[in-house]
Image (cartoon, rainbow, N blue to C red):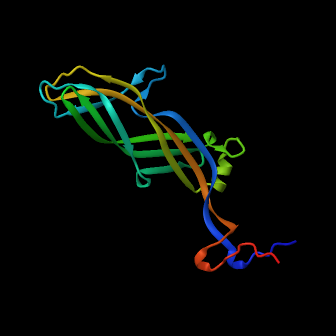
């Protein structure tokens, strides 16, 4: 028996359809590693220490960023440049208590288009990129301290921590499209999305 769906239950949505995505795991977003795997850490400076106070460790940290601090630009149809500006909050334990260090950082990554993978598991081509992509969205998660080293105190009121932080970065490419769905929106008064006789 045919199912006659009322027109008021037919929804025309404007939605972003994901075409392909790229996932970078264990990606250094602060500091880096060289081609041989040796650490090239960022020097995080802890200031305001007493003369007899020294850093023991980084007790905890948090990375904060928002949609307004993530930008992407396309180089023709060959590359995507991802830029993430984030704030790092570090809780540093000393022999006399805790210090906090807050600093703004910028991470930039250039990703070739063919490193974006479509839903069928194949690489995105330049032609497909040109025809199907006009939007992008990046998600950063799974932050970890991959390397840390507290340097010997040199100045009486500050000390340096060498640190590398890695994360998983998922970059999604897509395009806004019309999508027809059938459902119920209460304020339209549609009680039954499928009114069968």
Q: Is residue 86 left or right of residue 8?
A: left
Q: Is residue 191 above or below residue 165?
A: below
**Residue 101 in picture, x, y percent from top left:** 26, 38
**Which quadrant holds the C terminus?**
bottom right
6 and 129: which one is in front? 6
Q: Quadrant of residue 6?
A: bottom right
**Which quadrant holds the N terminus?**
bottom right
Q: Is residue 73 above or below residue 16?
A: above
**Residue 184 in picture, x, y percent from top left:** 65, 72
**Total labels drawn:** 0
12 and 105: which one is in front? 12
Q: Is residue 117 above or below residue 3?
A: above
Q: Is residue 141 left or right of residue 176?
A: left
**Residue 43 in picture, x, y percent from top left:** 30, 29
Q: Residue at x 61, y 39 (%)?
A: 115
127 and 195: which one is in front? 195
Q: Residue at x 47, y 21 (%)?
A: 37
Q: Is residue 32 above or below residue 129?
A: above
**Residue 145 in picture, x, y percent from top left:** 41, 30
Give the farthest residue toward the left.
Answer: 51
23 and 91: which one is in front? 91
Q: Quadrant of residue 24?
A: top right
Give the farthest residue toward the right.
Answer: 1
Q: Is residue 71 left or right of residue 155?
A: right
Q: Residue at x 42, y 29 (%)?
A: 32
């Amino acid at each position: 028996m045919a199912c006659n769906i009322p027109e008021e239950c037919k929804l025309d949505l404007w939605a972003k359809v994901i075409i392909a995505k790229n996932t970078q795991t264990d990606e250094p977003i602060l500091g880096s590693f060289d081609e041989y795997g040796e650490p090239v850490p960022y020097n995080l400076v802890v200031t305001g220490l007493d003369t007899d106070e020294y850093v023991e460790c980084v007790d905890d940290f948090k990375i904060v960023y928002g949609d307004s601090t993530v930008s992407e630009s396309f180089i023709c149809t060959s590359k995507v440049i991802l830029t993430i500006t984030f704030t790092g909050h570090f809780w540093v334990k000393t022999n006399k208590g805790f210090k906090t260090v807050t600093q703004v950082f910028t991470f930039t990554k250039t990703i070739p288009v063919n490193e974006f993978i479509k839903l069928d598991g194949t690489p995105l081509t330049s032609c497909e990129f040109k025809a199907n992509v006009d939007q992008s969205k990046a998600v950063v998660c799974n932050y970890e301290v991959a390397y840390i080293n507290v340097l010997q105190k040199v100045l009486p009121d500050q000390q340096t921590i060498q640190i590398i932080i890695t994360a998983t970065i998922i970059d999604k490419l897509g395009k806004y499209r019309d999508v027809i769905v059938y459902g119920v929106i209460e304020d339209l008064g549609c009680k039954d999305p499928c009114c069968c006789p």
